[in-house]
Image (tube, helix red, strand yellow):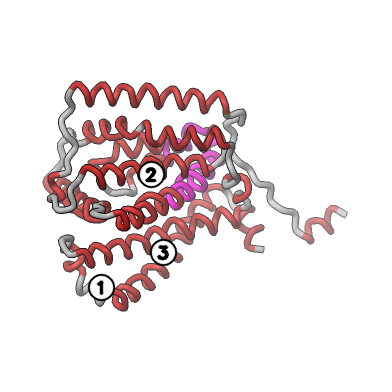
Amino acid sequence: MVTFFIRSLSPLQRIFFLIGIAFLVGGVTSILGVNLLKVLYGLSLPQDYEMLKDYDKPWIVGANKFLLFTQHLGFMVLPGFILVYLSGTKNLILSSPKRNLLIAAVALGLVLYPAVTFLSYINQQIPLSESLLEMEKSAGLFTMAIVRAPDLATLCVNLFLVALVPAVGEELVFRGILQREIHLFTKNGWTAVVLSAFIFSALHMQFGGFIPRFVLGLVLGWIFLRTGNLVLSMAMHFANNALALFLVHWLQPSTADVNEFDIPDYDLGSIVLTVGSFALGGLIIYWLNKKSARAMEPIIVEVPVTADEEEKED
């Protein structure tokens, strides 16, 4: 009955339904997370909110990671799986991809990392107001506290929490649901890709990284549009996230100040690496385009016929 109701909604109605599910499930998991935070870490919110900014203490960083996990789970992963399952697209968009396409998607996520870093450098040249700069600094401190991995065990935790969970949840919501519904609503695949990528980047609320996230969202959206397989987008997203974590683990000393991990000025070697990243990424995209036989049409699931309707037809 619920499945029939979801499938009978218009694309725009399903988007609002997703928002409703996200707030409902996210609210429940947030309440559970806050209560578990008190049990596991002895912190009460909002009273101890300022303590969560003391990133020099490993257990405080652990508490932040726990809250981050509950947020991703409640607002992205669970609502995404619920709506994908109820809409009947689970078997269509989460099917196992061909091995060569999967390898290409992972390679694309790795190869494009220097290009994304260059776009971050360009983005950081845009002047921001004092209030936005303060927000960016606060977000940067939080991010570096989360991703810093002084040992292999922490790196493995980060790969799950910061690379895998967001890759699955964000691709479910922004590509598997939002992009698909916008495509059905507008009848234009590229409009859906651009709008979902814009929303994907904007909702991160970090203006210093808007451009690279937007471009990454365009590529992820194109992969889903061209192949119809969300696993490929997830694989590319995970690979890009994972490479960033490995680089932080290997290049960033565990005792370094967060503010010291800035994007360096570009020398000749960096420029060559960036150009190579764009070029090789373009070649992989070209190859994926040739190997993907699917027409870039929206994924449609027929509304099931109810028993009453069958009786009327008879």
Closer to us: mark 3 or mark 2?
Answer: 3
Helix, strand or loop for disc 2: helix
Residue 238 position by quadrant: top left
Q: Identify residue type, mark 3.
A: Gly
Where is mark 3, residue-wise? 26
**Amino acid type shown at disc 2:** Ile
Cα separation, mark 1 vs mark 2, equals 29 Å
Which residue is identified by label 1? 45
Where residue 174 is drawn, which disc sits there?
none
**Crowding at mark 3 (Cα within 10 Å: few <14, some 14-19, many 20+):** many
Specify whether residue 179 is painted magenta: yes
Task: For the N terminus, give its image quadrant.
Answer: bottom right
x, y percentage for residue 167?
42, 48
Badge 2: how crowded within 10 Å, few (<14), some, or many (20+)?
some
> Where residue 199 sits in the image (x, y, percent)?
38, 44
Q: Main secondary structure of the magenta part?
A: helix
Q: Residue furthest right?
A: 314
Left or right, 230 with respect to 158, comes to right
Q: Which span is picked out in magenta?
A: 169-196
Rendering quarter of residue 220: top left
Disc ID at residue 199: 2
Considering the numbered disc 1 on the image, is that residue within a helix, a strand or a loop?
loop
The answer to whether residue 274 shows anywhere in this view is: yes
> In the rendered structure, which disc, 3 or 2, sits on the residue that comes first in sequence?
3
Where is the C terminus found, in terms of image quarters?
Answer: bottom right
x then y, percent, for residue 303: 68, 51
Instruction: Answer left or right for 139 relative to 221.
Output: left
Residue 147 is left or right of residue 110, and the answer is left
Q: Position of residue 221 (x, y in %)?
A: 46, 37
